[in-house]
Image (spheres, rainbow, N blue to C red):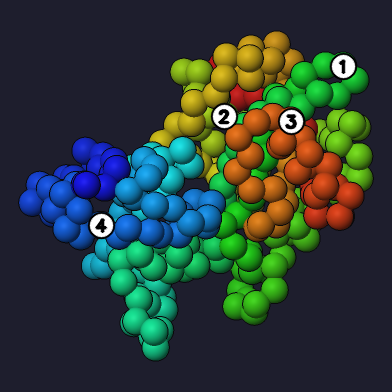
Amino acid sequence: MPPMLDVSDAVRAEIGDEEAARLLAGENAPGSYDCTSCRNPGDTQRERTSTVLFMGEETAILAFAHASCVPSQVVTVSEEQLQGAVATITGDPSGAGEADFAAAAADAEPRQAVLGVTCGQVLIDDTLHPAVVVEPTGPIARPGTDGPGDDFLPLLIEQGFRPVTDVAVPPEPIEGWSVLLAMGKLHGILQPSPEGATQPTSWWQAHQPLEVTEGWRHAANRRHTVLVYASPAGTIGQQPREDLLREALEKAAAGGTLVAAAMPLAGT
């Protein structure tokens, strides 16, 4: 039985029609893989799977992800990041195949703040608030360091995010940040411009604009504010329902691994 693969037009344009056909026929597709988004196991024979092509200046790595996590797409990264992934693969004494590409590519990126984003609504004081939950795919090192530690939360606290001890209390506003919504889709999270610049820059930018529910969009447009929560890798995960997302947020807050800020909505 051929694998349940999604190959986008962008990926097909890069790998060519022949390679795309081989993938769809199952010749070059893995049976099992680690999702490049949520890092959980996947099976191309049992669930829809997205092909994600990481491209550097000279090297490309084809990774795989649950279609429910991310769509099939091309992601441009630095050659250094991809070379690190290749070295990880070829240096593995057990021998790594295509099924390992997703994990290796994901491991190469977290130092450059590869962020996973989940949208949902959070009930506070009997009112639903639009929320965005940000969680990296791996540890985030402080710029200029290459140590094994995770500085994701300390870096955000330095930017003005506040630790959350009770999800029932709305987070404080943060100056200069905003959530960009355009044409009804989530495009990114903007941070203050660097010194000397006039325009805000992207802290997180969707590779492809993210769909949000009608309820989320209406709440955001009504309140003109989005609550942005952040936690270290492996804390929240991809939660399929808002009640489960709330439980994960409360657990992270109780464990001291959740920060948040309220941001104005940019766009509609």
Residue 48 numbered tag: none
What amino acid is labelled 3 in the image? Asp
Instruction: State the CA–CA distance, disc 1 to disc 3.
Output: 14 Å
- Whether residue 130 appears in this view of the structure is yes
Using residue 88 as the reference point, say whether residue 31 is left or right of it: left
Depth check, front residue: 156 or 64? 64
Instruction: State the CA–CA distance, disc 1 to disc 2.
Output: 26 Å
What amino acid is labelled 1 in the image? Asp
What amino acid is labelled 4 in the image? Ala
- At mark 3, the secondary structure is helix
- Whether residue 14 appears in this view of the structure is no
Name the quadrant containing residue 209. Answer: top left
What amino acid is labelled 2 in the image? Leu
- Above/below status of 174 relative to 32: above
Q: Residue 2 at what x, y percent from top left?
A: 21, 47
The residue singled out by tag 3 in the image is 243
The residue singled out by tag 2 in the image is 180
Using residue 236 as the reference point, say whether residue 204 is left or right of it: left
Q: Residue 249 at what x, y percent from top left?
A: 78, 42
Depth check, front residue: 149 or 4? 4
Instruction: State the CA–CA distance, disc 2 to disc 4.
Output: 36 Å
- At mark 1, the secondary structure is loop
Q: Are marks 3 and 4 in contact (CB under 8 Å)?
A: no
The disc, 2 or 4, on the residue closer to the chain's N-terminal end is 4
